[in-house]
Amino acid sequence: MIERTLVLLKPDAVARGITGEIIDRLEQTGLKIVGAKLLRVDRYFGAKHYNHNDEWKEVVGKRSIADCEKFGLDAREVFGTGDAKRIGEIVDERNAEFLASGPVFALVFEGPNAVAKVRSMVGPTFPDTAPPGTIRGDYGLDSAFSGMIRKRTTYNVIHASGSIDEAKQEIDLWFRPEELVDYKRVHEELYKY
């Protein structure tokens, strides 16, 4: 099934000059770029991107509390509260703030099973636990612990849509229809699918 997915190379990837390497890895899988732009966003736009529902906030908040316990940190000191939902909201706020901290390279990739393919290449959220061979495992320099003690998000280089529905919403947020291009890559002409 041909899908489209959003990829954001976050400010840490742009600042480190590794956007080309990451794009190359994604393109080598046969996915094609159908939209791309380098831009700066403000916190308001970042908050529209990181606008999760209450269930997500509760889950992320509980995971953050558990991570604090694992690291010997007090969640109330790290987040200013022990309420899981509020911690999830703070995670969204910190993510939005980071997105607004520097240039972001936004891309739309298209191809068979693009959402799952990109997600598997990106790896788990935290670079210190992402396996080698994933983008976060190979390029990420940060950890959940480092982000928590500094009261900021974890710098993890890249965002990729988590589902087909999320990809559609995110692409609509980041790109106007006329900014997306249809074309055939060489292998599409050779192997019609």
Image: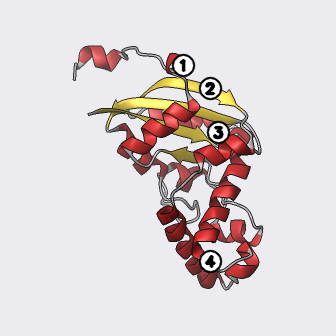
Q: Which mark is residue 95?
A: none
Badge 2 density bin: few <14, some 14–19, many ≥20, Cα 10 Å: some
Residue 77 horizontal side relative to residue 113, left or right = right
Q: Earlier in the sequence, mark 3 or mark 1?
A: 3
Give the Cα separation between the discs numbered 4 and 3.
37 Å
Nearer the observer, disc 1 or disc 4?
4
The residue identified by callout 4 is: 83
Relative to 100, is 87 above or below?
below
Amino acid type for the residue under numbered disc 3: Ile
Q: Earlier in the sequence, mark 1 or mark 4?
A: 4
Q: Quadrant of the C terminus?
A: top left
Q: Quadrant of the N terminus?
A: top left
Marks 1 & 2, CB-CB < 8 Å contact: yes
Give the Cα separation between the discs numbered 1 and 2.
9 Å
Disc 4 element: loop
Q: Earlier in the sequence, mark 3 or mark 2?
A: 3
Q: Residue at x 64, y 65 (%)?
A: 143
The residue identified by callout 1 is: 179
Amino acid type for the residue under numbered disc 1: Glu
The residue identified by callout 3 is: 18
The residue identified by callout 2 is: 37
